[in-house]
């Protein structure tokens, strides 16, 4: 981590402590949730999915056109991050 990034992180940590004194009690959970979101994002993008303000869109298995995540699930398909 660069010096400027470390300084920014320290400033943000202090700001959060002023805003929410128990912030550090939850920090590990918050960072784990962010890491999980990043993992899902990377997997879905690699599988050809797209994200915008309306949510996730996946390529239709029948036409290749983009469909909503709920339509994808209605096809009975698994999300890419659920495939092992």
Image: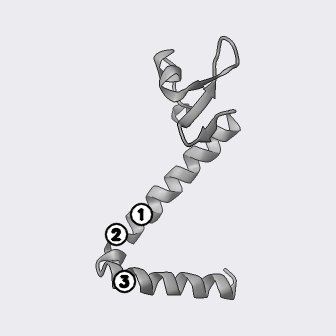
User: Residue 23 at x, y = what percent?
Assistant: 34, 75
Tell me what residue is drawn at x 52 percent, y 86 percent: 10
State the residue lying farthest toward the left.
22
Query: Horizontal placement of 51 versus 14: left or right?
Result: right
Neighbor class of circle 1 (other Cα within 10 Å; few <14, some 14-19, many 20+) is few
User: Which of the image's four quarters has the C terminus?
Assistant: top right
Q: Nearer the viewer, residue 38 or 12?
A: 12
Q: Are marks 1 and 3 in contact (CB under 8 Å)?
A: no
Q: Which residue is mark 2?
A: 26
Q: Nearer the viewer, residue 67 or 77?
A: 67
Of discs 2 and 3, which sits in the foreground? Answer: 3
Neighbor class of circle 2 (other Cα within 10 Å; few <14, some 14-19, many 20+) is few
Instruction: Estimate the spatial distance between the alpha carbons at disc 1 and disc 3, rounded to whole Å.
Output: 15 Å
Using the rendered view, name the quadrant where residue 29 is placed: bottom left
Helix, strand or loop under label 2: helix
User: Residue 67 at x, y = what percent?
Assistant: 59, 23
Q: Are marks 1 and 2 in contact (CB under 8 Å)?
A: yes
């Amino acid at each position: 981590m660069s010096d400027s990034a470390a300084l920014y992180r320290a400033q943000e940590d202090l700001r959060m402590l002023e805003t929410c004194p128990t912030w550090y009690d939850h920090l590990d959970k918050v960072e784990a949730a962010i890491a999980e979101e990043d993992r899902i994002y990377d997997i879905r993008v690699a599988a050809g999915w797209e994200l915008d303000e309306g949510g996730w869109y996946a390529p239709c298995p029948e036409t290749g056109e983009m469909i909503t995540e709920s339509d994808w699930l209605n096809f009975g398909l698994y999300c890419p991050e659920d495939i092992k």
